[in-house]
Amino acid sequence: MTLERSDNYEGLDGRIRTVALTLALAFLVLGARLWELQVHRGAEFSGKSDRNSLRIQRLEAPRGTIVGHDGVVLADNRPARDLMFVPADCDVAPEIVCRRLEEILGIDAAALMEEIEEAIATKQPHKQILIRRDVPSSISARVDEYAYALPGVFTVVRPIRRYAYGKTAGQLLGYLGEINKSELELQNLGEIDKSELQHSEFPYQLGDLIGRSGLERRYEKTLRGKEGKMMVTRYAVGVPQIRTDLHGQPHVENLVDSYGHNLRVESEIREPIPGKQLDITLDIALQAKAEELLDGEEGAIVLLNADTGALLALASSPGYDPSIFVTRSGNRKRIEALTEKPNRMIHRAYQEVYAPGSVFKLLLAAAALEEGIIDPSTTHYCPGKFRITPTGRTWHCWKRYGHGEVNVVDALAYSCDVFFYNVGLKLGVDKIHRWAERAGLGRKTGLDLPGEVPGLVPSRQWKEDLLRPAHRNEPWEYRWYPGDTVNLAIGQGATATTPLQNAILMAAIVNGGRRVQPHVNSKSKVTISEPFVSEHTLEIVRRGLRKCVEKGPPAPTGTGHRAYIEGFDIIGKTGSSQNVSLSQHEKYESEEDIPKELRDHAWFVAGVLDREPRIALCVLVEHGHHGSSVAAPLAKTLIEFFYASRGSTPGLKVAREVGGMSP
Ligand SMILES: [Zn+2]
């Protein structure tokens, strides 16, 4: 097991929820010490002789915790110390303080001085100027030690995001970023929902953190807490304020801020309300395993509950640690993450498309059976190649000397291209397109994460729309040809799918023909379609997919045999997504000579039928070349890991209610 907690978790034991709760409570207390001010009655109080001031203190709310399967905390908050400077509280020349800060902290005194001068010039002496964010406790202790020499400097404690497992599930959790000026002015919103900024009861302020991607973005409203506020009068350091209560009894104010200033609360405190907890379906151990399997590769793994659509693992490689966006020290790493190739900012499971290749054959088989175009006894002869007309273009089967006479079950098991060229032509592009739509290809799955791409299933209309503008008077340029259908039949050409879509397709084969809505939020209200394929058809398709993972003899070994696990009812389908044309391949003596970047992408989709929960998964390895040798073994490892960790027993049948089950 390679799952490791990030360094930030040193010293925390398993009772993490208790700790998180304690921290949340601590923030409520610490919140009372935060200074986020607006100057009220500024003119009245800005005189040098009177350094007391009436201010609104903003109390930052901790962000909601994200909790995975089995109550494992994936993202929570820790206290961070920010060093601030308020010109009005500095009774010596600010240059002196700046120079001392330079000596102690190594900050750029000139840059800080510039900000201070600007605040003074624009008549904002009470403005809080950030000296340094998230300083280690050793530094804040030194600042406290030299407090007498650093008038105007104080520490603000605020909650800061912590990702318990670092890089693991990083892309899925997403990251936070500060709201900038143009976003606040609603000029350049990018991905931010305008309504959120305008209509929120608690509008964002410059520098506030907002979810930028993943769950942090999608569930911003849930996770963001409600800030608290209180109106306080603040008095100089070390001067106890003696006041009288309603009955005229004198008492000493005892509320102080972090710098020892006395506070008097003028109006009621509205306590900050922490963001709501987000419970997600992700199994972090499984996720870590999936990411480990993809280590060093570019690719994606999806594993979901085939009956509910609950995502148990959603891995993409390479990934990133969202913590680098939280801390200042992450600056360099952050730039790397944003600019490096290969792109680690996209989630390859649902934000990237690939030709489905032979994975598409399982849909084609189901469609042809449902349409009555073939039955289990229908055979086509595969001599290793295929022509539509005797003199036309030649398409090849991956098996050079052919599969001979094959039926649908064997065509799925051995992935015969020629069988599906024939079946595709009989079905025709319109029916293929309609069936692909029913299966959910070519459109978003409804996943509750931002930035999902729809993919594409070509159609007559699509080709015409694409090419007609450039070839108005040349209808032969945009007409759909049988050759296009042949390419479509084996999932090549312009066909584009996400690994997530292929996992959903496999889930339908497992669960009785239903299209599930993939989701990460455990409380998602999801829809599950009525069966779009009959059980009779599914049984035939499953027979082929079961044979695909079986080892011969007596039957020849299937292309997915590397996913075979003794005692498991596993179905699977290999695929390779063509990356370059065959003519380019022909330049190379053997497959091993093909440079990696030109190699095909490797697919493997699989389902487990006789365990609880029933699962579907999809593995995609970019430039992995063959689904059979590269992707299938990863699926096998992950299936074994998953059921071993759940302690599942073979053949266990549990009454299932579609839609109402936990993963
Ligand atoms: Zn063949």
Image (cartoon, grey):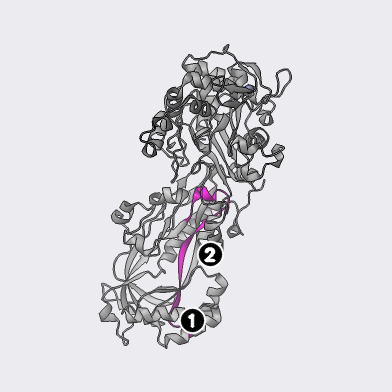
Residue holding disc 1: 109
Q: Residue 171, position in %: x, y? A: 52, 49
Q: Secondary structure at mark 1?
A: helix
Q: Residues within 10 Å of mark 2 (few under 14, many from 20)?
A: few
Asked if residue 357 is positioned above or below residue 114 in the image, the reply reads above
Q: Secondary structure at mark 2?
A: helix
The question of residue 165 being in magenta is answered with yes
Of the four image quadrants, the one with ligand 1 is top right
User: Residue placed at 43% from the left, 85% from the top?
Assistant: 94
**Residue at the disc numbered 2:** 331
Residue 300 against residue 513 in the figure, above or below: below
Q: Position of residue 127 (x, y in %)?
A: 36, 75
For the view shown, which residue lies furthest in the right direction? 553
Going by the numbered disc 2, the residue's amino acid type is Asn
Question: Whole-percent x and y of residue 480?
Answer: 44, 28
**Residue type (three-letter) at the residue carrying disc 1:** Ala
Residue depicted at x 50% and y 21%: 425
The mark that comes first in sequence, 2 or 1, is: 1
Identify which residue is drawn at 69% across, 31% down: 562
The picture quadrant where one finds residue 128 is bottom left
Name the residue nearer the viewer: 240 or 372: 372
Q: Which residues are magenta?
A: 148-175
